[in-house]
Amino acid sequence: MQFQEAYQPFRALGSAWKVFLRAPLTILVGGVLLFLTNAWSGTESGVKWRFDRLERLEPEDWDRIVVIVPPLLAAGICIALALWLFRCLLLAGFPNAVERVLARGQERVGDVFDPRGQWLSMVGTTFLTKVIGLLLFLPALAALGAGWLVGEATDTGGIGAAVALGGILIYAPIAVYVWLGVSLAPNAVALEGFKPLEALGRSWSLVAGNRLWLLLYFVVLGVFSFIGVCACCIGVLLTSTLAETAQCESYLRLVRTQSQGSWWIDRHEDEPGEDAEWRSHDEPPTGQDPPPGGEPPPPRTDTDYV
């Protein structure tokens, strides 16, 4: 598929729903664990709650804080690190579990926890993307600082706020451009076996010329995930799982162009033999262009799913 067809959000969500119905346990386990291991969920409110209450402490309480906080902080760092490493394992395994269902219609929960030798590469890739995200945040922080300085110098909060807002609005397209460029790197590691720097380059080349479309795609998936909050917040586990599955499906549609005709999801409605053996094609169909962004590793065979 071409990029805009592969990353058509409503088509991808429809396929994700079919995959979920075919292998509900595998998809739900992987999707829910990815949602729960999101390191940024709910941290801001917790930090704000603690700092808001520091002013209520008595002087004698600080002696106890000095003793208690360091071990708690160390424990928190260890837990966050363990969750991140576990999340990297899921990011490497879940896309392959989705591919098994797409290609063969088979459910295997163990695939979610099988990184296929890509765990360290996923750790490196997610670390690099976090570093890039931090660097992208620094100019926005500088704009806020400039706005504060202008406000202090002019003794006019409105001018300072205008300077800060203007700086952020000017810089935001640059940050979004870079973020979209590296957003597909984890899937490049999990599904094509690229190393961290290679995965960033692969993502950048795949996204080239399609950033606005990819931004729309992510916006639709984000809105869809948020809809689950309306169902007493429980529905977000399902909607976020389907959104994660849709992202894996879209990437597979983009890069696995040689074998899609034999996938279970493409033939199960037309052919009675849903569990027939899946075969990858060594050669692309006549007249089909190779996938964008360079040649990926050879397509998988049946032995890759054993």
Image (tube, rainbow, N blue to C red):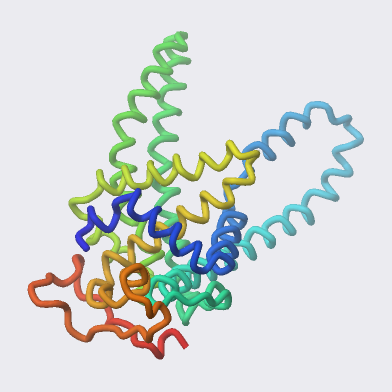
Where residue 26 appears, as percent x and y from the top left, is: 55, 69
Q: Quadrant of the N terminus?
A: bottom left
Q: Residue furthest front?
A: 272
Q: How many marks?
A: 0
> Do we see residue 197 in this rendering?
no
Provide residue 199's location: percent of width, then percent of height. 33, 68
**Residue most extreme to the bottom:** 303
State which quadrant residue 129 falls in: bottom left
Residue 83 position by quadrant: bottom right
Task: Judge by depth and name the residue closer to the eye, 290 or 17.
Answer: 17
Task: Say whether residue 70 is left or right of residue 1.
Answer: right
Residue 293 shows in this picture: yes
Q: Nearer the viewer, residue 165 or 224?
A: 224
161 vs 38, nearest the viewer: 38
Q: Position of residue 23 (x, y in %)?
A: 52, 68
Asked if residue 169 is positioned above or below residue 95 in the image, the reply reads above
Q: Is residue 86 left or right of residue 127?
A: right
Q: Is residue 120 left or right of residue 198?
A: right
Q: Residue at x 29, y 65 (%)?
A: 253
Residue placed most toward the observer, 37 or 233: 233
User: Outermost residue toward the left?
Assistant: 287
Quadrant of residue 56 in the image?
Answer: top right
> Is residue 91 placed above or below 286 in the rendered structure?
above
Residue at image position (59%, 53%) is: 39
- Taking the spot 33% from the left edge, 36% from the top edge, the residue there is 172
Residue 125: horizontal and vertical position, in percent? Answer: 42, 65
